[in-house]
Amino acid sequence: MAEFWHSDLLPHLESRRSCREIACYRPHTHDTFSIGLIDSGTTVFSSSKGEDIRLVRGDVILIPAGHLHSCNPDHGTWRYQMIQADQDWLSALLPRQAANPFSAIRVFRHPEIYRHFNSVNDLLFADADTQRIKDGLRLGFEDCATYEAEHQMTAGTDAVLLARLGPVLLRLRHNEMNPSLDELAAIAGMGKYQLIRSMKRVTGFAPLAWRQNYRITEARRMLRDGQSLTDTAHALGFVDQSHFHRVFRAHVASSPGTYRG
């Protein structure tokens, strides 16, 4: 079960409320900053470095854009909320004196932080005044700057290697068909297995898994912009609607139609 919130008045934000009983997410990234709230039950958060953290009721997890992760139920049912915000928009919204929330994944275990972000999500689903929503986000991050995180995971990026892989990522973005590993390795000037290791080091993904994640990120953007499921699937090179549905659900734990609303 999942419900999503989108609004033309705040295109830099989206949110969801979900209840899950089974493993539902494969490793993925977001192009937005994510604020996750655990409402009930427990779940295991897994990072690209193989670190596992058990999240419990009342926990708040902050995930900067681009960090590979997965999050699935530990035992039984869990309920959670996820607010996602454009990172540049959020950065401009926060006061200058606020601590930088974008440098690491952080888990907070403080009732006040949960209360503030839960109130923000209530405002979103109630289509409240946009200023109240912005003020609520500021208060939440001010609290995060006040308390010490229960867990923190940094993820450094090899800028030189990322630049070398730039042409490969460009090809993966814009090629309508899955390019071969031989072709991608030649573009990077590497062997196939060196390419796979390098991609995982920089992005957390093997090449074709990175392409799938990118396509789902684009699909979410297109669906929020009002594109039809058929046009979205076709534009992104999915074989058919069934294929699009399977891949989308594996990344988002919801169908494209439910997400679009």
Image (cartoon, helix red, strand yellow):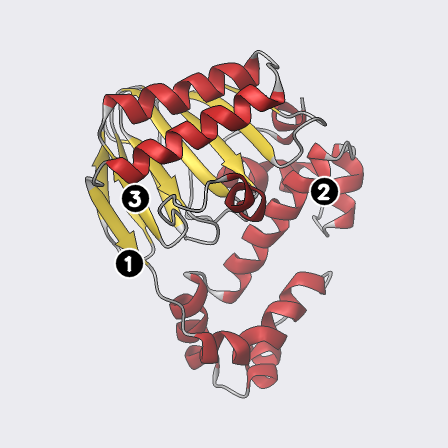
Q: CA distance from mark 2 to mark 1?
A: 34 Å
Q: Residues within 10 Å of mark 3 (few under 14, many from 20)?
A: many
Quadrant of the image occupied by residue 230? top right
Tell me the residue that label 3 is attached to.
106
Tell me the residue that label 1 is attached to.
49
Tell me the residue that label 2 is attached to.
240
Q: Residues within 10 Å of mark 2 (few under 14, many from 20)?
A: few
**Are discs 2 and 3 less than 8 Å apart at CB?**
no
Mark 2 or 3: the one toward you: 3
Lower position in the chain sequence, tag 2 or tag 1: 1
**Residue at image location 36% in from the left, 27% down from the top:** 37
Q: Secondary structure at mark 1?
A: loop
Q: CA distance from mark 2 to mark 3?
A: 38 Å
Give the amino acid type for the residue marked by disc 2 in the picture: Asp
Q: Is residue 144 visible?
A: yes
Looking at this rendering, what residue extends furthest in the front direction?
A: 97
Give the amino acid type for the residue marked by disc 3 in the picture: Arg
Residue 254 is situated, as x and y percent measured from the top left of the image, at 54, 29
Q: Is residue 84 left or right of residue 150?
A: right
**Residue at image location 38% in from the left, 35% down from the top:** 141
Residue 86 is situated, as x and y percent measured from the top left of the image, at 57, 43
